[in-house]
Image (tube, rainbow, N blue to C red):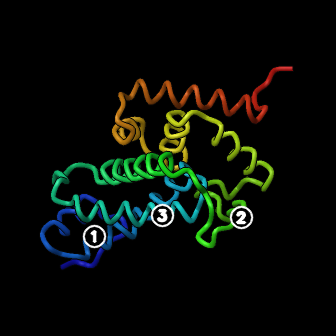
Amino acid sequence: MAQDLPDAPLEAAMARWLAGDVRGFETVYRRLSPRVRGLLRALCGDPRVADDLAQVTFLKVHRARESYQLGAPVEPWVFAIARRTWLDHLRHRRRRPESLSADGQLPEPVHAEEAPVGFDRLDAASLQALERGLDELPEAQREAIVLLKVDGLSAAEAAGVAGVSVSNLKIRAHRGYEALRRALGVGKRP
């Protein structure tokens, strides 16, 4: 088989994987795992939980590989699985709301160097304000912003991941942007 090219479409890697070549999965994992972790980190706010959820996501991707339709875009399919993994985590957390660390202590606050991908250009105060603003958004608005701005999905791809129409996703994102602007004090007229 030809050497894996960094610009080769993920759809080709999925086809190779489904044909029995494990290198196809390795390509999908290598190229998407940082973005899946970023999505989950932005959604849940805890890098350790995001790492765990990313691993669960790729386990689910492996188990669901036969449901993938050859030639369909891979990214929205994987991000939809990641989103459902996050929602499963939320449901579990609602049933068992404790949020202690593994050693039974309160978790440490998130540091700026653990920020989601793309947030590294912000100073610590701006990053904290943005994260607080995102945390205060309704779940649907936060998800829309993360899918569009953190993960860089198109509106159609993000809508597919969120399970809503493109119009609905755009409305959610717009309302989220407005709420973030108010929370951050950006765009206020004197």
- Give the structural element (helix, strand or loop) at label 1: helix
Identify the residue at horizontal 52%, vertical 57% (top origin): 38
Residue 49 image offset from top left, x and y in percent: 53, 61
- Give the structural element (helix, strand or loop) at label 3: helix
Q: Amino acid at mark 1?
A: Phe
**Which numbered disc, 2 or 3, marks the residue that appears first in the sequence?**
3
Q: Is residue 109 above or below residue 24?
A: above
**What numbered label is drawn on residue 108?**
2
Farthest residue toward the left?
A: 19
Cα gap from disc 2 to disc 1, whole angstroms: 34 Å
Marks 2 & 1, CB-CB < 8 Å contact: no
Left or right, 127 with reference to 165:
right
Farthest residue toward the top?
A: 190
Report the residue marked by disc 3: 34
Q: Nearer the viewer, mark 2 or mark 1?
A: 2
Identify the residue at horizontal 73%, vertical 53% (top origin): 122
Report the residue marked by disc 1: 25
Q: Amino acid at mark 2?
A: Glu
Cα gap from disc 2 to disc 3, whole angstroms: 23 Å
